[in-house]
Image (spheres, helix red, strand yellow):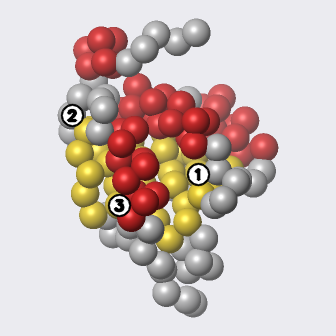
Amino acid sequence: MGDRPDVPDDVVARIDTVLRAWQGVRQESAWVGIRWKVRDATVAHVFGGEDGLFRITFRGEPDEVAAFGHMGPPYFTVSWGSNVIGMILDEHTDWTELAEALQDSYRIQAPASWTSSDLPADG
């Protein structure tokens, strides 16, 4: 097994800019990489894999988890969470699409009273 690389600062900063715009989100070190939480719920987690690739996980509705899982790379699912979607981060990452996914993850994890006034309406 290889070492897990640190996530580049510019990647962390880019994700942090999206997530810190919303009420109650805080960044912290995770067992590996960096995670963003609202209260005790993880909204997103970015980390380097032993294969040298960088990944981010975030929350999604069950139908989204299934859809992303069937799309294949850069998306993946995990065995440890029924509402978790993963994405490989590389030079092909669509940062606008990721920002939208992170917004959805925040909506799922944050108290409903926060998300009703914090985020733009769907549609």
Q: Mark 1 or 2 closer to N-term? A: 2
Judge whether residue 32 can be spotted in this image.
yes
Check residue 34 in the rendering and tell me which mark sits there, or answer none: 3
Q: Residue at x 43, y 60 (%)?
A: 10
110 shown above or below 83: above
Q: Circles 3 and 2: CB distance less than 8 Å?
A: no
* Label 3 Cα crowd, 10 Å radius (few <14 / some 14-19 / many 20+): some
Report the residue marked by disc 2. Answer: 24
Check residue 86 in the rendering and tell me which mark sits there, or answer none: 1
Q: Mark 3 or 2 closer to N-term? A: 2
Left or right: where 31 falls relative to 2:
left
Per the image, label 1 sits on a secondary structure element best described as strand
CA distance separating discs 1 and 2: 23 Å
Q: Which amino acid does label 3 sit on?
A: Ile
Position of the C terminus, as image quadrant, is: top right
Q: Mark 3 or 1 closer to N-term? A: 3
Judge whether residue 83 can be spotted in this image.
no
Left or right: where 28 falls relative to 81:
left
Q: Number of numbered discs present?
A: 3
Check residue 111 in the rendering and tell me which mark sits there, or answer none: none
Position of the N terminus, as image quadrant, is: bottom right
Q: Between label 3 and label 1, give the one nearer the viewer.
A: 3
Q: Residue at x 58, y 36 (%)?
A: 96
| Rendering coords of residue 53 (x, y %) | 60, 71
Q: Circles 3 and 1: CB distance less than 8 Å?
A: no
Q: Which residue is drawn at 55% across and 89% down?
A: 2
* Label 1 Cα crowd, 10 Å radius (few <14 / some 14-19 / many 20+): many
Q: Which amino acid does label 1 sit on?
A: Gly
CA distance separating discs 3 and 2: 16 Å
Q: Which amino acid does label 2 sit on?
A: Gly
Q: Which residue is drawn at 43% across and 49% down?
A: 14
